[in-house]
Amino acid sequence: MKSFRTIFAKDLDSVSLKSEMETYGYVFIRDLIPKGDLEQLLSDMIGIASDEGWMIEGSAPSDRIANPAMACFDPEPKYKQAANRVFCLERLHALTHQPALTDVMKRLVGPRLLVHPKPIARMIFPNCEGALLHAHQDNSGIGGSPNSYTVWMPLHDCLQGQGTLEIKEVSHLFGLQHTDGYIRPETAQGGDWVGGPINAGDAAIFHSLTVHRSTLSTSKQLRCSVDCRFQSYDEAVSPLEIVFPNRAKGGRSWEATYADWKHDDLKYYWRDLPLRLKPSVADLSARAEKADSPEKRLRYTTIIEMIEREIPMLVRSDTFPSGRLC
């Protein structure tokens, strides 16, 4: 397999990230994030994994030796329990606003940067087929504007065989590709698959239409990584990237997420931005009226209520055609 096209952070001023992204659908940057910014978050995540019984008793936390008897993956309840605890970590959300990272993202999207407020921290058991993410495009799941980007960062060195990331070059040029839940590798459009070791501090950044996949970890260690998303707030964003429509069923909420934070500066930061929603409140209202079941009608009205509560500053949200909402 071809290796990632590599850009070193020290060389960023001599490279056109936009040109690289437009041509290949991704950029891979070595040494972008100071490792010290990752170490404490990794320690917090391993602490939660240990609390849940996921680590071999007596092993050093820094070794991340997973207990195979406790293997689980999203959406299993015992995985969600740990993932919800990790989502509440202030350090996780602070990482997505790390200056070196936001500087790079502004080079790609411009100064009006929206950091999506729902980063995903992943704790992946070794030899766990159910945790594999097969070939897919993020835009098919997150909706909104296709002009958004995902950043994938391991919190520790991630070598071949430890569940790393692979990207299909130039696949972003083919629009949304046919999927049966995942895109079949033999039918995926684009160039070569690329991959390689990704170390703590490195960042793989790719377009929302770029086809990518994870690989199976054959080590004994828990793999810990973060993926987060960015776009210009001039582009449409799905309300589901901000609100929690399942909070009434015991799901996440921003109040619970922020309960133990020590600082306020990153709480509800999107409320001051002139966001454009796709689907808009008007779209959702129309869907609620036409819903063919009480359950669907309740889902749409709940999302509207959450929008009114969490995104009070709406500008031109009704100027977009109906968007995809699963």
Image: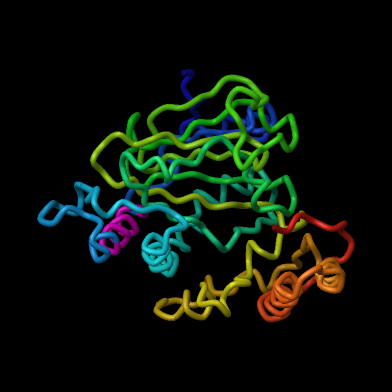
Q: Which residue lies furthest to the front in this view?
A: 293
**The quadrant where residue 173 appears:** top right
Image location of residue 124, percent across then percent down:
36, 48
Residue 122 vs 27, above or below: the answer is below
Residue 28 in the figure: left or right of residue 76 = right
Residue 28 appearing in the image: yes
The scheme the figure's colours follow is: rainbow
Residue 307 visible in this rendered orientation of the protein = no
Quarter location, residue 315: bottom right
Residue at x 43% of width, y 55% of height: 121
User: Residue drawn 49% across and 44% down?
Assistant: 152
Q: Nearer the viewer, residue 186 or 100?
A: 186
Q: In the visual, does 207 lie left or right of 289?
A: left
Query: Considering only vertical position in the picture, is 115 above or below 139?
Result: below
- Image quadrant containing the C terminus: bottom right
Determine if the magenta segment contains residue 39. Answer: yes
Asked whether residue 34 is drawn in magenta, I would say no
Q: Which residue lies furthest to the left in this view?
A: 58
Residue at image point 44% right, 65% down? 87
**What main secondary structure does the magenta stretch of the protein show?**
helix
Foreground: 281 or 237?
A: 281
Q: How many labels does the image show?
A: 0
Residue 132 position within the rendered picture, expressed as x and y whole percent measured from the top left? 45, 41
- The percent position of residue 25, horizontal first and vertical second, equals 64, 32
Residue 253 image offset from top left, x and y in percent: 53, 76
Q: What stretch is highlighted in magenta?
A: 37-48
Q: Is residue 84 left or right of residue 317?
A: left
Q: Which residue is drawn at 86% across and 73% down?
A: 289
